[in-house]
Every structure is written in C-alpha cells, then in structure tokens.
Image: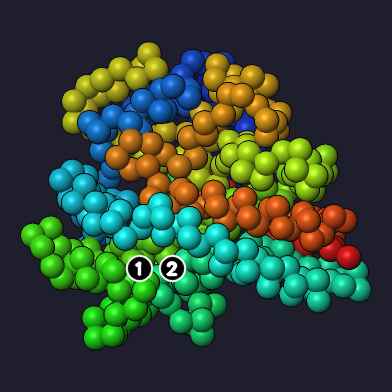
Amino acid sequence: MDATEIFTALLEPAGKADPYPLYAALHQLGEAVQPMPGVVVVHGYDAVSGVLRDPAFLVSDAAHYDQVFPGWREHPSFVMDSILNLNAPGHGRIRSLMTRVFTHRRVAGLEPAIARLTDVLLDQMAERGGDGSPVEFMHDFAFLLPVTVICELLGIPEADRESFRPLIRDLAATLEVGADLSVLTDADTSAIKLREYFTDLARHRRASPRDDLVSALVQVSDVGDGRLSDDELLDNLTLLLLAGFETTTNLLGNGLQVILREPAAGAAVRDRRVPAGSFVEEVLRYDSPVQLTGRRRADPVVVGGVDVPPGAEVVTLLGAGNRDPRRFAAPDAFDPLRPDGGPLSFGGGPHFCLGAALARLEGAVAFQRLLDRFPRLAPAGEPERRAGLVLRGFETQPVTVA
C-alpha cells in the first residue's frame, strides 16, 4: 500500500477499529508522508515529538477557521476561546491562569478521595455482579470515576453529573477527522446547555466562593491585567469537563481490555510485581486514548524528510508514534516494564495536556484497586468499540466480577 491508500484506509471503519497494522505500514515509509496535496501525516516518534514541541507549529484557531469554515461562528459547539484552540499569546496567558489553580499539589491531594470513590464504585459493581451477572464496566466504572473526580474538582453538584455524559459525547463527536456536519446540530444544542450551566455556576461561585476550580478560576478571571473574559472562562470550563473524563474513560477501558486479553499483565499489577503507574504508562503507549492531533505553520519546513508547504494540514499520529519500532523495542508487545517508555499520548510542548497528572493518578489508583478487589475479573461478552480514530475507546465492556 502507498501513503494515500494507507491514509484512506485509516479513515474507514475497519481502519478506525484497528489502526495499528496501518501504522506499521506507515513506518515502512519513513517518519512522515504526504498522502495528498496540502496534507502531511507525521507518524515517527521523533518527528511527532518535534512537531508538538515546536511553537512555530500552530493549532487551528479562530483566524484559521475563518478561512476554511467561515460559518463556524454560527455554531456554539466551536469552543474557540479554550486553550485547545488558541495560539500565542492568548494561549500562554490563559494556560498560566489555569495552571495556577490546576496545581500538582492540588492534584496529588486528590489521591485519598479518588481511592474512596473507586472503592464505592467497586462496591456497587460487586453488588450488581455478586451472583455472576454481567456488569457493564464502561458505564458502571470507567465513566463514573473520571466524571465524579472532575466534577468534584470543578465543584459541580452530584445531582447534575449524570446529565453531562450525552452532552460531552455530542461535543466529542465534532473532534473526529472527517466528521459529518450533521453532528453539529446535537453538538450546538449541548454546547448551549453547558454554557448556560457554567454561566449559572460561575455566578453562584462569585457570590459564594468554595474550595473548587470554578471558584478559583472565577477569582483569577476577575482580577489582574491577564484576566479571563467571560467567553474564555466558559469555554475553558467546558474543555476541562470534556478532557477531564472523556479521555480518562478511554484510558480505563483500554487498560481493562489489556487485562482481559492478557491476564498475566493484570496479575503482575495485583501481585505488585509491576507498579500500577508503570502499567498505566504502557496502556497509554500501547493503546492511546487520543490517537492524533493536528498542526499547521506559516512557513515551509521539512518534517521527517517530507517538505511541509505553508498552511498545510499536519496530522500528527500519536498512536503511530507510540508504536514506532525506531523508538520502542517490540512495539506491538505490551510490556509495562520496558525501559524505553515515554508515550506521546498527552502531546507535548505548549499544548501538553494540563490534566496529564490527574489522568495518570486516576488510572494507577483505579487499576490497582480493581485488580485487588476482583481477582477473577473476566469478560462476559464481546466489547463494543467507539467508532472513532481521534478518541479511541470502548462503548461497552461487559465483565463478571464474582
């Protein structure tokens, strides 16, 4: 297969379901390819890392969308004032404000709460599946743990949390490569609902601050020269909610699939022969929750031996970089003790994932306690994968726990 055929296959249902053989074929062609005019696909580990870390490579911001999709401003689902879609200087200003409140100390301090929440969910799974009945892992655990954690962090009341899942799923659909414009109808409706919710929550936190991220962001947005505008505050709260559980849910589901397919990997974590944190790092490399992202730049450059013309779409395949045989020995083998770690799954450079530490912490706590609690965890039917390439995960994974 040539580069065009491989890239086309990646966008088809079979390619999205299992992109790894296609990634292997790309690696035979070097570190980057140009499958069609105006598009460069970067898949080698070093080349992907170089693009992500180079601030000259830009994300698609409002000015770019004005050129390629002038009607985007009619769709509230485009949260263009979030750090996901901002370049310098706006990106640095807002990220620095968010970093002040999303600190390592605050995240590390969540470990006891995450452990308690995990145990509550495991108790509920044990109650549902105590007689051998199947338990739906994705809904009963992989979704509920991250959404509870991020909502606790943001300060969202418990009664409101379950309603967020369909809203976030609608927004996540807009991130997929080649998404049909029809997805914008539901996404716009969901974006409006989230915006109204966060507007009301921010108003309450201004009047009665609490020890949560919404209160902290409201405070930093109201003082100093670098404050957040109302649109920036609301868009970044939406982003935190989306990123806070959508990707971690996929991390937990992808990790469970490894455990079910390779029981020895789970047993090694349960027996403490493999640290849970190392297991999480290898899940991130082996089956990344986020498979690709995009960049562009104004001037010509060479990436992975391929000429990138000004304005070209640069598709960085994180999942392919994580399976690059030039970087990882036996890249298709799951080895949590491999000495050549360092997955690209959280990106790099200015846009490195703000919640990476939280996702790693949740995964390490969750997998250790899950395996300790259910040593006979087993599949109870065929899992259903989500139909996507950007966000890779499962819709359902039935298991037995008794």
Q: Is residue 85 above or below residue 321?
A: below
Location of residue 175 in the rendering, given as x and y in whole percent from the top left corner: 42, 53
Location of residue 170 in the rendering, given as x and y in whole percent from the top left corner: 46, 66
Circle 1 is placed at which residue position? 213
Q: Residues within 10 Å of mark 2 (few under 14, many from 20)?
A: some
Q: Quadrant of the N terminus?
A: top right
Query: Dot 1: what SS?
Result: helix
Would you say the residues marked 1 and 2 are in contact, meaning their CB atoms lie under 8 Å apart? Answer: yes
Q: Residues within 10 Å of mark 1 (few under 14, many from 20)?
A: many
Location of residue 400 in the rendering, given as x and y in whole percent from the top left corner: 85, 63
**Toward the viewer: 83 or 169?**
83
Q: Is residue 259 left or right of residue 392?
A: right
* Residue farthest to the right, as pictured: 131
Which quadrant of the figure has residue 248?
A: bottom right
Q: Is residue 17 left or right of residue 166?
A: right
Which quadrant of the figure has residue 280?
A: top right
Q: Is residue 39 above or below residue 271?
A: above
Q: Quadrant of the C terminus?
A: bottom right
